[in-house]
Amino acid sequence: MVTVKDYGSYATAWCPGCGNFSILEAVKQALVASQLKPHQVLFVSGIGQAAKAPHYMNVNLFDGLHGRSLPVATGAKLANPGLTVIVESGDGCNYGEGGNHFLAAIRRNIDLTLLVHNNQGYGLTKGQASPTSATGFITKAQPKGAAQAPFNPVAVAVAMQASFVARGFSGNEVHLAGLVQQAIAHRGLSLVDILQPCVSFNKVNTFSWYKKRCQEIPADYDPTDWEAAMKVAEKWGETIPLGVIYRNHRPAFEDYFTALKQGPLAGQKVDMKMLREILEEYR
Amino acid sequence: MEKTLNILIGGEAGQGLVTVGEILAKSFVRSGYFLVVTQSYQSRIRGGHNTFALRVSPEEIYAPQEPVDLLVALNDETLTLYQNELSPQGRIVADQGCTLPEENCLKVPYGHLASDKFSNIAALGVVCALLGLDEGLVGGTLEHFFGKKTPGLAEENRRVLEKAFRWASAQSVSFEKLPPSPNPVSRLMIQGNEAIVLGAISAGLKFYSFYPMTPSTSIGLTLARFAEKMGLVVEQAEDEIAAINLALGASFAGAPSMVATSGGGFALMGEGVSLAGMTETPIVIVIAQRPGPATGLPTRTEQGDLNFVLYSGHGEFPRAVFAPGTVREGFTLTRQAFALAEKYQGPVFILTDQFLSDSYRAAELPELETLPPVGLPIQTAPSNQPYQRFALTENGVSTRLLPGWSENLVVAGSDEHTEDGHLTEDLSVRQLMVKKRLKKMEEIRREVVPPEFQGEREPDLLLVSWGSSKGAVWEAAAKMKSAGKRVATLHFSQVWPIIQEQFLGILQEAGQTVCVEGNATGQLAGLIRLETGFEIKKRINRYDGLPITPEFILRELPGTK
């Protein structure tokens, strides 16, 4: 029986009141609810305040480069499909620096859970605009306000028919834990975009700003209806929908590889007899 | 090396020139000959001017040759570009419409022998008849090449080949044929890139990710062809950054992994190289060089990225760099690269170039049974003590466990970390970790492949080289030796680290030293000076996109022209 104690409890480097605390708790709750033992789980993170989260849990972890968590996680999953692989990093990491990998991961539909802490700004480097910052968002780097239109990860993922797309809010921890648990259970790429306040550098999108707008999707909503999902995905303003917005059952990418039917790649012997036959082709 | 024949087939892309070249090459190999193939092509799918040069000999040869003994022109441009390179006894095979004098040109009525689509096969038949190759053997090779997929095509090929053979045999042309191979063993016909692939598979490669880039692409294509049979995961990534990070993820999870690219793609991999150094993740990185900077000459050759690879990746961490000089070395050094990467847990490089990557040779590889296994057994330490991925040890190498294979948790990070892998800003730990990583370099230095010295000690002239120019340097030296000169060669197949005790004495005792490199700035000579203080003053550098040949070296050497 796995309990939350198995995942440990550590001092963090986050600001008091940061949304990361409740995300960390929700993720642990989801892992326990999934009855996964710590060694069965591999977290892959990047760079940013969010990317530190897996350091505060007892799990396998590869904390790599800024923006590159998805390819590392994809490689690890393809080497050992038995691992539950979870990518956890921020909006800058996944939607900015790693944007191309975000698109590729959705296209592959590799069985990963992608948890994106989305605070609409860069925390680690002290407050510049991120890909999800609203137009006009004023920072020291964008003193006249951000000129670009924000990136809507949920709408992009639904448009590309990602196989599981959800949005959560750090201020709704129980609901978020449920989403993460469903994302882990889903076979294929599962995106959970997690809205969170940044208490130090985002004075616009505060806890109460989110609290006022975030609304759970009604229970009778059908997330398999793609056209309806596109409409929900585009909603962003006075109300922001939370929940599983879209899902489908595309085959998972790892099923494509015959080699993986024998289990993890590590420890698979070289078939020297077959290699000799191959060499004969060169004669 | 006395009796060799240099055949150059020229034409435009789309004429089936490589097909003819490959079938001819394989027919020679099956007849027991040695060969060195040089492929020169433009960066386009149709048109342009491409050549496929085969130098053939009953004895072992190592380098391409410039003078052409048999020029096979599939279009008029080939005649314009290459007829001046004909050797004194050289002959031309061209379409009957050409205006060249009859005495050294065999004019072929291609229109009568075959339809346009099959005229390359007609050329093959004429050339094979002229060279005295066995018609049955060439026919068999042709069938092997096209397979049994399209029987109609195979029949038509065979018919055209026979007709061309018959026509050519009836012509009265004086062409000195090659002596038969004294020991007609059938060897393998493989290119540099294929040798790297076969070496990697034999060493236990399980994961390969790539983004297509000439001249490295054929590595991925060959691996993709064998993926099902050999149980490999081969994935075309969205870019080179993803390619190296995919491979690092796979390696972290236990799959022996490799990536291949060329200079521009490798530039994108730089941060990943550094990540491999920091997280101590084994990875083999192949760089098939082509002339830069930037896009440069995409389909030509150069040895211009030695410095780039030596200094790639920010920060300080150990690495090893191999540079195969032959196809066989492509196989053996790739195996060594995997062994080293696994043992010392970090990036190991293989530097090849367009010339060697695309160059077919008749090669014999080591017996597969005699090859020792490369990988280390998977370890599962007892889980009652917390596992430390980066435990400080005597030689800097920590026990590497795999995530998910035991209850131990494996933590690796790109930040400076404590022994357990978690990030730290404790500056005393920083110092210990830097020392730990660099200690592995001492171990790597102990396993260096020493430079290969050939010739008598204290020579009047010592030619120094690395990588693919090995054969040209050997043959240039042999020519000078047979002219009575005291010449020796020193060739580096591993270019990092280099150990001065292994070669400095040889450099110091030579009368004159000359460094021969396929780049403009003399990067190996620079490295030798940096590491030993010894300055090789005379340099022969080639940077026109073509491979170094023995003739090029002899032309460039003072007093030989």
Image (cartoon, rainbow, N blue to C red):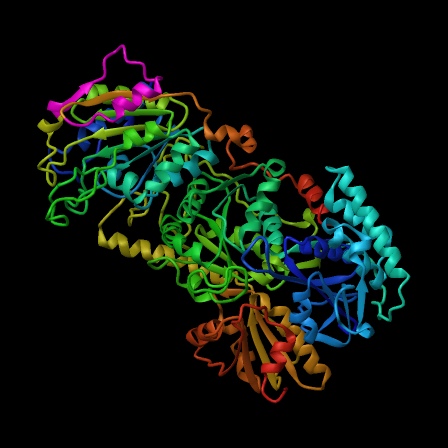
Q: Residue at x 82, y 74 (%)?
A: B103
Quarter placement of the N terminus of chain B: bottom right
Q: Residue at x 23, y 33 (%)?
A: A117
Quarter placement of the C terminus of chain B: bottom right
Q: Nearer the viewer, residue A209 or B52?
A: B52
**Magenta part of the protein: which range?**
A211-237
Q: Going by the image, does B155 lie left or right of A10?
A: right
Residue A233 counted in the magenta span:
yes
Q: Nearer the viewer, residue B432 or B76?
A: B76
Please, which residue is most extreme toward the bottom here? B559
Please, which residue is most extreme toward the top here? A220
Residue B323 counted in the magenta span:
no
Q: Residue at x 71, y 57 (%)?
A: B21
Residue B436 point in image, percent of width and height: 36, 55
Question: Which quarter of the figure has residue A204?
Answer: top left
Asked if residue B65 can be seen in this view, the reply is: no
Q: Nearer the viewer, residue B320 or B186?
A: B186
Q: Going by the image, does B23 lie left or right of B220?
A: right
Q: Is residue B221 above or below residue B385?
A: below
Question: Which quarter of the figure has residue B120?
Answer: bottom right
Residue B410 point in image, percent of width and height: 37, 38
Q: Is residue A30 above or below residue A11?
A: above
Q: Residue at x 36, y 50 (%)?
A: B275
Q: Going by the image, does B304 lie left or right of B491?
A: left
Asked if residue A150 can be seen in this view, the reply is: yes
Residue A14 point in image, percent of width and height: 16, 38
Q: Nearer the viewer, residue B84 or A50?
A: B84
Q: Going by the image, does B394 lie left or right of A255?
A: left
Q: Is residue B220 above or below residue A151?
A: below
Residue A20 point in image, percent of width and height: 19, 33
Question: Which quarter of the figure has residue B462?
Answer: bottom right
